[in-house]
């Protein structure tokens, strides 16, 4: 995902629930570069199976994803993963940019992940 350049016109940018929610730009007609957090999660180890890429936090992964995240690519930012929905029970290690083909080192039990969020970018 490329970081977009946006020509702003004194608007408030950011979608509710996004990491940049309510960010206000006060310099009209100035080109800025917005760097977004970015990760891709996979249902199987070694980046196999169903996957999706996101810049947003997720408080509930849903039935298709809960207990199935087995590998991750972090393209931008530092991300925190939680064992349960609603950002409960964080794993002890936050992940920065890199390819994580096997998440056993995190102590994930059966690839359990109920929610995740970017914490730095």
Image (tube, rainbow, N blue to C red):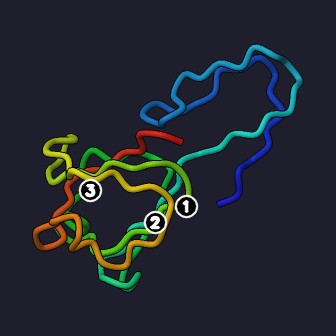
Q: Is residue 63 left or right of residue 43?
A: left
As drawn, 58 above or below 97:
above
Q: Is residue 17 left or right of residue 64?
A: right
**Nearer-N-terminus badge (2/3):** 2
User: Label 3 to label 1, Cα distance in Å?
Assistant: 20 Å
User: Label 2 to label 1, Cα distance in Å?
Assistant: 8 Å
Q: Nearer the viewer, mark 3 or mark 1?
A: 1
Q: Is residue 40 left or right of residue 45?
A: right
Return the residue at label 1: 75
User: As drawn, which residue projects farthest toward the right?
Assistant: 29
As drawn, 37 above or below 28:
below
In the image, residue 100 lies at what x, y percent?
A: 39, 72
In the image, residue 31 lies at what x, y percent?
A: 86, 33
As drawn, 114 above or below 52:
above
As drawn, 60 above or below 63:
above
Between residue 7 and residue 36, name the one nearer to us.
36
Return the residue at label 3: 61
User: Label 2 to label 3, Cα distance in Å?
Assistant: 13 Å
**Residue depicted at 39% across the width and 50% down the height:** 79
Mark 2 and 1 residues: CB-CB less than 8 Å, in contact? yes
Q: Badge 1: how crowded within 10 Å, few (<14), some, or many (20+)?
A: some
| Image mark for residue 67 | none
Mark 2 and 3 residues: CB-CB less than 8 Å, in contact? no
**Residue depicted at 22% across the width and 41% down the height:** 87
Name the quadrant of the N terminus: bottom right
Name the quadrant of the C terminus: top right
Task: For mark 2, give the secondary structure.
Answer: strand
Task: For mark 3, give the secondary structure.
Answer: loop
In the image, residue 116 lies at what x, y percent?
A: 31, 50
Task: For mark 1, give the secondary structure.
Answer: strand
Return the residue at label 2: 40
């Amino acid at each position: 995902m490329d970081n977009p350049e946006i020509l702003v016109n004194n608007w408030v940018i950011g979608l509710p629930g996004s990491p940049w929610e309510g960010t206000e730009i006060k310099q009209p007609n100035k080109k800025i570069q917005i760097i977004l957090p970015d990760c891709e999660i996979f249902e199987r180890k070694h980046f196999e199976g169903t996957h999706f890429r996101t810049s947003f936090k997720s408080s509930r992964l849903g039935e298709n994803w809960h207990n199935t995240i087995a590998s991750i690519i972090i393209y931008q930012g530092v991300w925190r993963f939680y064992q349960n929905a609603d950002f409960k029970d964080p794993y002890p290690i936050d992940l920065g940019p890199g390819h994580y083909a096997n998440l056993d080192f995190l102590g994930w039990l059966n690839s359990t992940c109920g929610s995740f969020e970017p914490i730095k970018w």
